[in-house]
Amino acid sequence: MGQPITVTVRPGVRGDVKHFELNRSLTGMQTHRYTGAEQDTGEKPPDELARRLFSLGVSAVTIYSSVVTVVAPAEQWPMLQSQVEDTIANLFIHYRDGQLPAAATPAEGAPPAEGAPPAERAAAPPEVAPAPAPTEEAPVSG
């Protein structure tokens, strides 16, 4: 579920910097800068992406619109680049082909399923009868 992001990699001026251009904007016109894993505590897509990139071992991330600039030691880029590309491309993928989504848990107070054990059925609150339909139609203005 979700749609992969198309990523194009461009080298930075310095050997420890890479720019990853995306086919969609992640931040709009706001710049998000992360210099350590302790700063990325938000719930927005750029925050989640920064968290995932820091877990790979990068040292800084800047996200502006559709460009993600990543700083990591130059000697690590040969193996790190494909991991960063994959992390960005799959940011919005919730599960992959062949995987089933996690089973939904019933909402609290919802009646148990038909095949539920009797103990669960007995603990369920009694069903409330629907309200009777109105017998008189509302007047139509016009």
Image (cartoon, rainbow, N blue to C red):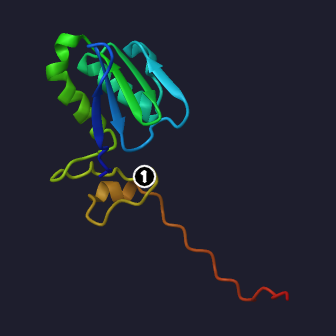
Locate residue 18 relative to residue 108 in the image: left or right.
left
Residue 11 horizontal/vertical position (percent): 28, 23
The residue shown at (43%, 21%) is: 40
Q: Can you say whether 133 is above or below 1 in the image?
A: below
The residue shown at (36%, 30%) is: 49
Residue labelled with disc 1: 107
Q: Quadrant of residue 122?
A: bottom left
Q: Quadrant of residue 118?
A: bottom left
Residue 69 horizontal/vertical position (percent): 37, 24
- The number of callouts visible is 1
The residue shown at (75%, 89%) is: 136
- Closest to the observer, 57 or 62: 62
Q: Secondary structure at mark 1?
A: loop
Q: Can you say whether 25 is above or below 124 in the image?
A: above
- Closest to the observer, 46 or 67: 67
Mark 1: give few (<14), some (14-19) or many (20+) Cα within 10 Å.
few
Residue 112 horizontal/vertical position (percent): 36, 59
The residue shown at (55%, 30%) is: 30
Instruction: Tell me the kind of residue under disc 1.
Output: Ala
Q: Can you say whether 34 is above or below 52 in the image?
A: above
Q: Can you say whether 51 is above or below 76 in the image?
A: below
Locate residue 136 relative to residue 103 in the image: left or right.
right
Locate residue 16 relative to residue 126 in the image: left or right.
left
